[in-house]
């Protein structure tokens, strides 16, 4: 059965770090998603908060710096991510636990807020994960979800298909197609939708190298991991494609927009 968790890709923080650096260096305007989610949640300060799929723990660290003093817990299925989160936040009163979002190790109705930043599309059963989040949230508690938008990034998504053809392996995680800002509604039940905010971030590059490096960070989403020779050959083809686009249109453009949704448990 296909595993959507991106185990190989998220073995450690390296690939996610490459992508985070790419968004902050090359996208315009620069969007601080931690700040946007913090503002949207309108946190009072002492709420008990769970970050599901917390990665390196940067969201909880950020809101702790902003003065949040309630109990904060980050969970991630990747041991490597949790090790990184613990290492980076050794001086902070935040707990980091290795756990699967589809089977959360918490009692019913114990959190005021749950955050899911760019994770729902990694769940093998999105329905199970949402049911678990519903279970651990208090009645009236808030859930903030961030998801990618489908439109604007077609050229980059198309590169993943070119890579798949080149390495003759179609078995890659096409996560944005599963659940995204445009279709998430059909997965949500038991919550009222309070706010939906779309955030555009435009990419305009005259140099192919950063896009190639960005795409290289997705290698672990192919199952099995593509062998070196085939992979680097595919990246060479992609680089040539990008150069053609830049020669024709002066710049390589995309809109790597994402959306935030604020929900309340009914
Ligand atoms: C795109 S990263 C987002 C990390 C972080 N939320 C952020 O915004 O930087 C997705 C994270 O979800 C984690 N993940 C994937 N499947 C999971 C699951 N079933 N349960 C918990 N975490 C999971 C991955 O290990 C990875 O750290």
Image: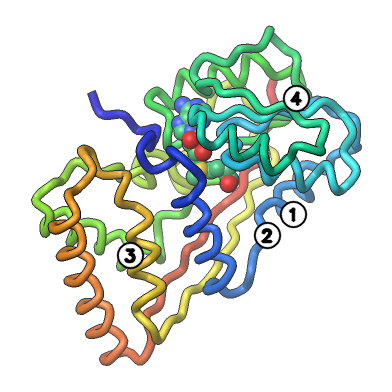
Find the distance from the CA under tag 4 to the CA under tag 3: 37 Å
Give the mark nearest the N terminus, 4 or 3.
4
Task: Name the residue at 17% across, 53% down.
Answer: 164
Single out the mark in the foreground, 1 or 4. Answer: 1
Q: What element carries label 2?
A: loop
Find the distance from the CA under tag 1 to the CA under tag 3: 26 Å
Q: Is mark 4 on a helix, strand or loop?
A: strand
Give the mark nearest the N terminus, 1 or 3.
1
Residue contact at pointers 2 and 1, CB within 8 angstroms: yes
Give the mark nearest the N terminus, 2 or 3.
2
Q: Is mark 1 on a helix, strand or loop?
A: helix
Q: Which residue does the numbered mark 4 point to in the structure image?
A: 141
Single out the mark in the foreground, 2 or 4. Answer: 2
Q: Which residue does the numbered mark 1 point to in the structure image?
A: 35
Single out the mark in the foreground, 4 or 3. Answer: 3
Task: Name the residue at 51% across, 46% down.
Answer: 13
Q: Residue 156 carries which label?
A: 3
Find the distance from the CA under tag 1 to the CA under tag 4: 20 Å
């Amino acid at each position: 059965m296909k595993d959507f968790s991106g185990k190989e890709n998220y073995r450690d923080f390296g690939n996610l770090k490459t992508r985070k650096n790419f968004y902050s260096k090359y996208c315009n305007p620069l969007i601080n998603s931690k700040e946007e989610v913090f503002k949207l949640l309108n946190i009072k300060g002492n709420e008990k908060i769970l970050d599901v799929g917390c990665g390196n723990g940067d969201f909880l660290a950020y809101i702790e710096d902003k003065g949040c003093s309630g109990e904060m817990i980050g969970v991630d299925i990747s041991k490597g991510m949790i090790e990184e989160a613990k290492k980076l936040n050794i001086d902070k009163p935040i707990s980091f636990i290795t756990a699967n979002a589809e089977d959360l190790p918490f009692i019913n109705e114990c959190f005021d807020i749950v955050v899911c930043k760019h994770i729902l599309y990694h769940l093998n059963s999105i329905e199970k994960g949402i049911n678990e989040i519903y279970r651990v949230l208090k009645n009236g508690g808030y859930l903030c979800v961030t998801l990618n938008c489908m439109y604007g990034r077609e050229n980059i998504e198309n590169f993943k298909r070119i890579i798949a053809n080149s390495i003759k392996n179609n078995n890659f995680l096409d996560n944005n197609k599963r659940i995204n800002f445009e279709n998430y509604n059909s997965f949500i039940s038991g919550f009222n939708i309070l706010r939906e905010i779309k955030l555009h971030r435009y990419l305009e590059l005259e140099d192919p190298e950063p896009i190639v490096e960005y795409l290289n960070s997705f290698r672990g989403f192919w199952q099995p991991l593509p062998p070196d020779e085939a992979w680097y050959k595919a990246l060479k083809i992609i680089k040539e494609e990008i150069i053609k686009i830049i020669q024709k249109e002066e710049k390589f453009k995309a809109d790597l927009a994402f959306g935030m949704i604020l929900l309340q448990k009914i």
